[in-house]
Image (spheres, rainbow, N blue to C red):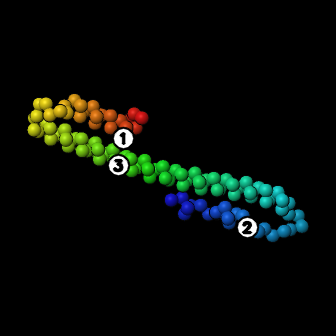
Amino acid sequence: MYSDKIYLTPQEILDKEFKVDARGYRPQEVDKYLDMVIRDYTEFINIIKRNEREIKDLTEDNAKLKAEIRSLREKLVASEEANTGNSGVSNVDLLKRISKLENVVFGKYE
């Protein structure tokens, strides 16, 4: 997802060679700084992968909950059409369950 927007990998930073000039920077300081950059890049990549997995899991959960809401609404409509007074599950029970599921799906309730 983000790999097309990131130009350097930690390995590319590690492998980068700079030309030495008489008035150049101290190689030890450059190496130390690049080591910090590599650690940051590695951590950023890990965070991105973890976030992408979490997004995928949450998207799947959201789809399941929406399907359950749809199913419950269909049951509610069917029970109203059948007009079956005491079928074990009352309309009030179904409405309460739908309300709770909508709150979970749409983030109003956790």
Separation of residues labelled 1 and 3 (CA atoms): 9 Å
SS class, disc 2: loop
From what the image shows, is residue 27 above or below residue 110? below
Q: Nearer the viewer, mark 3 or mark 2?
A: 3
Location of residue 31 by image quarter = bottom right
From what the image shows, is residue 9 above or below residue 107? below
Quadrant the C terminus occupies:
top left
- Mark 3 surroundings: few (<14), some (14-19) or many (≥20) residues within 10 A: few
From what the image shows, is residue 30 above or below residue 72? below
- Residue drawn at point x = 88 percent, y = 64 percent: 23
| Residue 16: image tag | 2
| Residue 105: image tag | 1
Between residue 12 and residue 72, name the one nearer to us.
72
Instruction: Specify the amino acid type for callout 3.
Output: Ala
- Mark 2 surroundings: few (<14), some (14-19) or many (≥20) residues within 10 A: few
Instruction: Specify the amino acid type for callout 1.
Output: Val
**N-term mark: 3 or 2:** 2
- Residue drawn at point x = 13 percent, y = 30 percent: 86
SS class, disc 3: helix
| Residue 63: image tag | 3
Report whether 96 appears left or right of 78: right
- Residue drawn at point x = 32 percent, y = 34 percent: 100
